[in-house]
Image: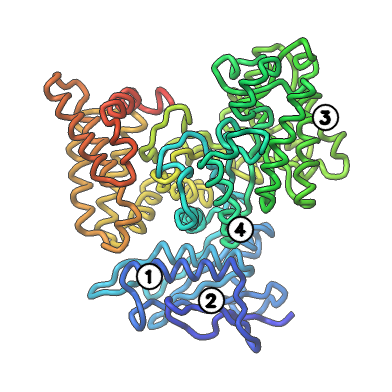
Amino acid sequence: MRFRRWVSAAVPATALACRMAGAGPVQPPIVQTALDALRHRAALLGASGRRAPAVRLTRLDPDRPRLGDWDLIPELAPLRPWQRRQGYAIRRQPGRQPEVAAQAPEGLAFGLAHLTGLLRAAPGGGARFDLPPDARLFEAPAIEERGEYLNIGYDIPPITPHTWDAARWRAYIDQLALARLNRFYFFLWGSDVTAWEGSRLSRTETSRRLFSELPGAIRYARRRGLKVVLMLGPTLIPNDVYDLHPDWHADIEYARHGFPVVCPNHPEAWKAITAALRAQLDRLRAVDAVQVWFYDPGGCWCEARGCKQGQAASLARQVREFARLFRRVNPRGGLEVNLWPMALWEREQKVEVRKPLVRALRRDFRSGWRGITMVGTAEEGPTPTPRWEKELGFRTGLFIFAANPESGYSFLTPHLRYVPWSARVARDFGVDACFGHRLEAWTRLPATALMAQWLWNPDLEPAEAVRRLSCSLMGDDRAGAALAGAITLLDRITDEGAAPELAGPLRAAAAEAWPLAAPGLLKEIEYLPAMLEAVAAVAESVGAAPEELARCEARFAEALRRSPTFASLAADAPGAFRRYREMLLPGWRNRMF
């Protein structure tokens, strides 16, 4: 096989291209979009024309094992095949531009994302890479499939995606790719949003917008190297249809709390379920896989139609039929099954579900059951770790559940303790996939970037992960150091509980950071200073007398009003202050929010 070198000469970041020796331009989408993202970041820092940084890319040929120390990258040799595809090395020799070397386009794209995170504002204008002149580093991920699960549930504009246009979707996907994730999972709450014409909700502005924008977002995510997984809640149907058919209603706690879930063993309800899912899959056919969640919300334990007695058979039927619907539009699509919260329901209903379900999947998918991904959690609580499924030969995944979607809490939750612990469990367990949860996605993107670092390296020290993220966000190392201090304090307040003595240091760190930041980057994170001030106001309210408590509430409200992102919260600032204060007082460690 011929040795291939991409970008044989250095070119400015504003005009980066990829060439194969002896041929015309060769620009795989995953590499080209990574180059475009680097170029865009450099431009935000003021780098254009001759002031733009330059990069060299080298594609290694694994069939030519003796091409020199750099070309070979000896660190790749002992790794698994997927690590060799995703791994990369970066070096910088004195007087030369940085070089990224990898065996596959994925590795080059991840290396470019790494370099993009190292862009800093240069003295006197332009941009530079935060690399010493003799830098040499190597990176390969600890977990093969790393992603974010976007729960498109409650509508909090513009924090949740309901009002996002194509540009905002691309910006969100860009952040996932910059974090070096390679999976994008999303779930649509079928009670409020649907493509099924059998429901009048298909004609709402929210449904029209989401089903108009999501196909483009899926295509763009794939160009950026992310495989896309659509999560399905099989028995959750549109509210208006549910209200018309009380005889369809499921016998389960979710239904008693007002969620529109129906019995899958009711013949007419089953027709509605399959029609709604068929319409959704037709509109979102470009996804790479589907993941079935039986109970979030959903499921039925009625005895009249045999759900309780035949629960495992009912769930197996759902997987079988929804896989058939999906493979009608994507014959090679992947299939995943989430065990959430199966252990809890087994205990409460005193019915074994998990093991007979798995046996049924092996029987029903006899030619492909080993390709099914069984997803659990790290805690071994209501949802089991899929250890038994792994022993049987299934692919496995872990879900990092770091937020309660019912809370509506929209501030950043760094989770400097819980997420790296979860990543270590995933790495040591040997899962194929691991993903975290977001609902209030836009204002929690820094937490996504932190999680992604630990999915690459679960042993990375939290202080170093926060420093890397903060310096990248600010485009300046001094500003990044100050922001890192603020995020560390925010994590302490969030995780352990609010305390008045933390308010002053949090304000001081934030006040030091913003004047030093690269101006071109501040628009992307304009919500951060407002959020930090709002959290400081909550912290100083702990134990305050009524008059001082009122002043803290006013400072909280003023902070929200300063940020366009928090306009929806600012409209009810007193209510948000009370809710957030109630959550922050004990801290996430003591009560999840």
Q: Nearer the viewer, mark 4 or mark 2?
A: 4
Q: Identify the residue position indicated by label 4 in the image.
A: 219
Name the one closer to the observer, 500 or 243: 243
> Where 158 sits versus 102, above or below?
above
> Where 384 sits versus 193, above or below?
above
Instruction: Where is residue 39? Give x, y as percent.
Output: 43, 71
Task: Tell me the CA gap for discs 3 and 2.
Answer: 48 Å
Instruction: Describe residue 378's horizontal placement relative to residue 591 as left or right.
Output: right
Task: Tell me the CA gap for discs 2 and 1.
Answer: 17 Å
Instruction: Describe residue 300's horizontal placement relative to residue 462 as left or right.
Output: right
Looking at numbered disc 4 in the image, what kind of residue is underneath it?
Arg
Looking at numbered disc 2 in the image, what kind of residue is underneath it?
Leu
Q: Identify the residue position indicated by label 2 in the image.
A: 57
For the rendered model, the colour scheme is: rainbow
Q: Residue at x 61, y 38 (%)?
A: 194
Q: Identify the residue position indicated by label 3 in the image.
A: 359
Category of crowding for the residue at label 4, using alpha-carbon neighbours closer than 10 angstroms: few (below 14), some (14–19), many (at least 20): some
| CB under 8 Å between discs 4 and 2 | no
Category of crowding for the residue at label 1, using alpha-carbon neighbours closer than 10 angstroms: few (below 14), some (14–19), many (at least 20): many
Q: Residue at x 73, y 43 (%)?
A: 335
- Assign a secondary structure to mark 4: helix
Q: Identify the residue position indicated by label 1 in the image.
A: 42
